[in-house]
Image (spheres, rainbow, N blue to C red):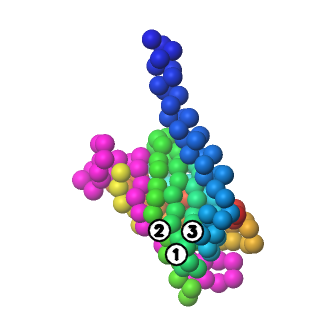
Amino acid sequence: MSSLLSRISNIRPRALGLIAFAALSWTPAAQAAWCSDGLWIDAMIGSHHFHPDKDFEQFNPGIGAECWLAPQWAVTGGYFRNSLSKPSFYGGGVWSPDFLHWNHVRLAAMGGIISGYNYGSYGFGHNHTIGPVAAPLIMLDYKRVGANIILIPPIPSSDLPFTLGFMIRVKF
């Protein structure tokens, strides 16, 4: 019985491993068709919370991707361990207009959905843990490396304040 339970519990990591393998083995031809303005792999590294009286997890490891469909538009998605020490998945779009782009710095906005937090009446899914997100981004890049700084708005039902998220990026 215990071996059956261990096999079942290993299905999720194996599935995630297969998805990661498929994403990493994505051919350049497929990337060229979809991500004509670049494919970036993001590594979430940490966060800073603007709340003087509460402790949150500041180390938030994760991985994601940005597929730039045009110079101003991208789709993005990924996974990270959130500040409440729960798994979070996100997906959405990024808009970075040309007039907010200066050499190696761009200002952008991200909108989409994210899981792993209590959204109360705004959420959906199991226990309302999936909800909307809209956030400004500062994107820094130099050749094939870069960084993202994102300002996540508060999520009152999870008692989360404004949060800065930090990612490093590599272009493929």
Q: Residue 45 location, x and y as percent?
A: 62, 52
The disc, 1 or 2, on the residue closer to the chain's N-terminal end is 1
Where's the C terminus, which quadrant?
Answer: bottom right
Q: Are marks 1 and 2 in contact (CB under 8 Å)?
A: yes
Q: Residue at x 64, y 69 (%)?
A: 32
Against 90, residue 73 (above or below) is: below
Magenta residues span 100-129
Where's the N terminus, which quadrant?
Answer: top left
The one nearer the camera, 29 or 167, is: 29
Which label was assigned to residue 93? 2
Q: Is residue 167 left or right of residue 143?
A: left
Residue that mark 3 sits on: 34
The one nearer the camera, 146 or 25, is: 25
Q: Is residue 81 visible?
A: yes
| Type of the residue with mark 1 | Trp
Q: Secondary structure at mark 3?
A: helix
